[in-house]
Amino acid sequence: MGEIVKKDVFIDSPYITLGQLLKEESIIASGGQAKWFLRETTVNVNDEPDNRRGRKLYDGDHVEVPDVGLFFIRSKQGNE
């Protein structure tokens, strides 16, 4: 099994959806898989379970995907 990652995910819009995050981080192959992935996997957003692929993630949020890692949402706008 691979190493659990801790990673900052930089966004250049006000938010990213949970489904977009899963796709961009190559946890799922396509956005259409988000619904099925979230049905079978308990993903925590800010330490609370959430299975909504449309859940908006903002700067400062963190997402824990079991057996994958912990992802911290960061805004690019504050870092330019």
Image (spheres, grey):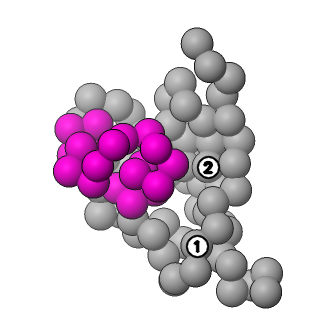
Dividing the image into 4 quarters, which one contains the N terminus?
top right
Q: Residues within 10 Å of mark 1 (few under 14, many from 20)?
A: some
Give the percent coordinates (x, y) of residue 19: 34, 56
Q: Is 77 rendered above or below residue 65?
A: below
Look at discs 2 and 1 and give the one toward the viewer: 1
Q: Is 42 rendered above or below residue 29?
A: above
Give the prevailing secondary structure in the magenta stretch. helix
Which residues are drawn in magenta? 19-38
Q: Is 2 rendered above or below residue 6?
A: above
Outermost right residue? 79
Q: Circle 1 is placed at which residue position?
A: 11
Give the percent coordinates (x, y) of residue 30: 29, 49
- Residue 71: assigned label: 2
Residue displayed at 44% across by 39% down: 27
Query: Could you say whether the residue bearing mark 2 is in a helix, strand or loop?
Result: strand
Q: Is 11 rendered above or below residue 77?
A: above
How far is mark 2 from mark 1, CA to CA? 12 Å
Amino acid marked by disc 2: Phe
Residue displayed at 58% across by 80% down: 12
